[in-house]
Amino acid sequence: MSPFPTTPDPGARPVLVAGGISDSHTWNLVYLHLLLEEHGQRVVNLGPCVPEDLLIAEALHRRPALIVVSSVNGHGYHDGMRTVARLREHPELDAVPVVIGGKLGIEGPPGEEEVAALRAAGYDAVFDDSPAGVAAFRRTLAALPQRALV
């Protein structure tokens, strides 16, 4: 991969980035946006405190290549469980990968049981905010097809 950002095709399926419904933080979303663009992705950043109905409507409309839910406030696990359940109610979104990451709990990184529960609820991957979690997320991005056309 080039060390310089690539320009995504205008027709590329976007990656949707959203803050959890109760998470008003924005710098994490800016960072994710830039990181995804560095990996050649077209990004639609929905911002913080994204209502599930808005996330669903955007996903149905845009048919994204990936949905990224981010949390900094420590309520990512609880908010994320509800969000993915709502997303997975829509069969049209079954093939869309959905990942969650950041500070998912107020007492530190999620344990194996919480990760398993998030995966069982419908997330394709779960990343905590540790250096290992960030590295795993970067590997996931590197594996995404760049400029995947609709």
Image: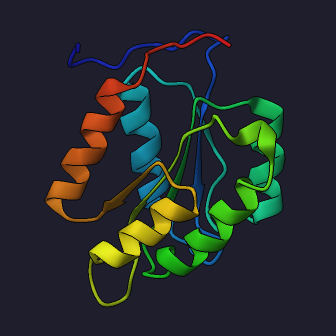
Q: Is residue 74 among what the camera can see? A: yes
Q: Is residue 36 above or below residue 107?
A: above
Q: Nearer the viewer, residue 5 or 66?
A: 66
* Residue under the image location 68 percent in, 13 percent down: 150
In the rendered image, residue 89, in percent from the top left (x then y), is placed at 78, 56
In the rendered image, residue 1, in percent from the top left (x then y), is placed at 23, 15
Color theme of the render: rainbow
32 horizontally vs 9: left or right = left
Q: Is residue 148 above or below residue 122?
A: above
* Residue under the image location 51 percent in, 69 percent down: 25
49 horizontally vs 23: left or right = right
Q: Is residue 103 among what the camera can see? A: no
Q: Is residue 134 above or below residue 25?
A: above
Which of the 4 image quarters holds residue 40? top left
Which of the 4 image quarters holds residue 101? bottom left
Q: How many marks?
A: 0
In the rendered image, residue 117, in percent from the top left (x then y), is placed at 46, 71
Q: Nearer the viewer, residue 58 or 114?
A: 114
In the rendered image, residue 14, in percent from the top left (x then y), is placed at 61, 28
Q: Farthest residue in the left direction? A: 131
32 horizontally vs 112: left or right = right
* Residue under the image location 35 percent in, 77 percent down: 113
Q: Nearer the viewer, residue 32 or 149?
A: 149
47 horizontally vs 104: left or right = right
* Residue under the image location 37 percent in, 68 percent down: 115
